[in-house]
Amino acid sequence: MICRVASNADIPAMAQIRALTWGEGHSWRKAILAYMEGAADPQRALKSRIVLVAEEAGSIVGLIAGHLTRRYACDGELQWIDVVPERRGQGVAAELLRRLAEWFVEQKARKICVDVQPKNTVARKFYSRHGAEELNPHWMVWKDIRVVLNNSGR
């Protein structure tokens, strides 16, 4: 598996992955493109952002996106993370999170937040395992994203 910066050519595959859990692929194509181009900004987002994909044998198996922000006095925000169902629980999401954490550190962003539904126990456990804490019922936070790097065994 390789992780790399996403290109516009990856948008259809990323949209298909997002649509498996979060609805129609066509709207995800538009949303991902707008996010990547900086034409759509989450609340309090800054323009610096990155989208990464995990690729295996020429197929996209996961994605992660993040940007710098001022929301909740955070330095950065994890926007999306998703992995194809057959590769969940096999370290793809952890590697994508590690790569995003590296980018945040390069940007001098330490306090990172993520919006996560209270009922999404799988995501909450994943983020907690990687050092995030509850900020409020809908948000979790890494007080210092470097904890992800320190716990990755690298």
Image: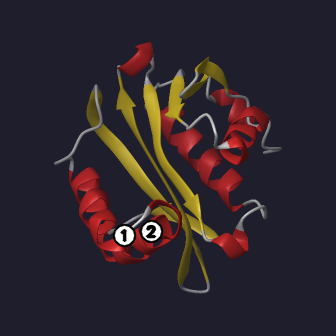
The Cα atoms of the two marked residues, 2 and 1, are separated by 5 Å
Tell me the crowding category of disc 2: few under 14, some 14 to 19, or many 20 or more residues within 10 angstroms, Cα based.
Answer: some
In the displayed structure, does residue 48 sit left or right of residue 114?
A: left
Q: Residue at x 66, y 56 (%)?
A: 93
Q: What kind of element bears circle 1?
A: loop
In the rendered image, which residue does mark 1 sit on?
A: 24
Disc on res. 84: none
In the image, what residue type sits under mark 2? Ala
Q: Residue at x 16, y 48 (%)?
A: 39
Q: In this orientation, which residue lies closer to the viewer: 107 or 132?
A: 132
In the image, what residue type sits under mark 1? Glu
Q: How is the image coloured?
A: secondary structure
The image quadrant of residue 121 is top right
Q: Farthest bottom residue?
A: 57
Q: In this orientation, which residue lies closer to the viewer: 19 or 65?
A: 19
Q: What kind of element bears circle 2?
A: helix
Disc on res. 19: 2
Using the image, determine if residue 71 lies above or below residue 116: above
Task: Report the quarter where the C terminus lies.
Answer: top right
Rendered location of residue 41, percent (x, y):
24, 39
